[in-house]
Amino acid sequence: MSTFLIADDHPLFREALQAALLPFFNDMEIIEADSLHNTISAIKKHPDIDVILLDLTMPGADHFYGLTAVLDKCANIPVVVITATDNEESVNIAMHLGAKGFIPKSYTSRKMAHAIMNVLNGGTFIPDRYIDAISSTHPEMLTAIELVKELTPKQLLVIKCLKQGKKNKEIAGELCVTEATIKAHISAIFKKLNVTSRTQIVLLFEKLDMVN
């Protein structure tokens, strides 16, 4: 039996995806989540999940922040991005961050099922048209992605707030921590990213579209 976590905020899509996959997987068990918070909770509650099918734009996910947060919680569970955001840059970032697959929502049920089977068998999957693009990723993007992978989910949350122009006190209130904790996070971020200003952090993340 395969246990799937479908993480998408649209109930009709979750229902349609489940119905589409049912003919291809015997004894399939489906766990559903409609936000990043509920996805993390489901991962903690169900350690026997075989694969996570993750949307990049559900509440709390903020594009690639959600992917990094999920990957941080499930190092041994393959994560497959299933999204309407179908472009070369998104595939590059998702796969280099650690996703095992990238499936456009425009795919037929058969193509989706075969892609997921490939991941469950230990492989990876991206659309054929992006294979050459993955192997020729710009060095600058790879360097930025490797830097981002060093950050913790909490530090990524702080960066999201920095991009929104929030001050330390506002960030501390939103994350329910002290200003001293936020200052410590920012100092650690400066060190990991080898930058000296908040502006440099925001510019780096705008390149990767990591946070909204």
Image (spheres, rainbow, N blue to C red):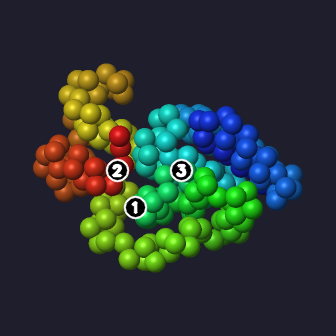
Q: Nearer the viewer, residue 182 or 85?
A: 85
Lower sequence index among marks 2 and 3: 3
Residue 172 x, y percent position in the rendering? 29, 26
Q: Amino acid at mark 3?
A: Ala
The answer to whether mark 2 and mark 1 are in CB contact below 8 A is yes
Lower sequence index among marks 2 and 1: 1
- Residue 131, above or below 51: below
Q: Residue at x 22, y 32 (%)?
A: 165
Task: Read off the residue under disc 1.
Answer: 89
The answer to whether mark 3 and mark 1 are in CB contact below 8 A is no
**Left or right for 200, reference 189:** left
Q: Amino acid at mark 1?
A: Glu
Q: Which mark is in front, 3 or 1?
A: 3
Task: Read off the residue under disc 2.
Answer: 209
Viewer can see residue 113: no
- Determine the secondary structure under disc 3: loop
3D distance between C-alphas at marks 2 and 3: 15 Å
Q: Quadrant of residue 30?
A: top right
- Determine the secondary structure under disc 2: loop
- Determine the secondary structure under disc 1: helix
Which labelled disc corresponds to residue 8? none
Task: Read off the residue under disc 3.
Answer: 84
Specify the quadrant that holds the C terminus. top left
Q: Amino acid at mark 2?
A: Asp
- Residue 193, above or below 92: above
Viewer can see residue 57: yes
Q: Residue at x 61, y 42 (%)?
A: 7
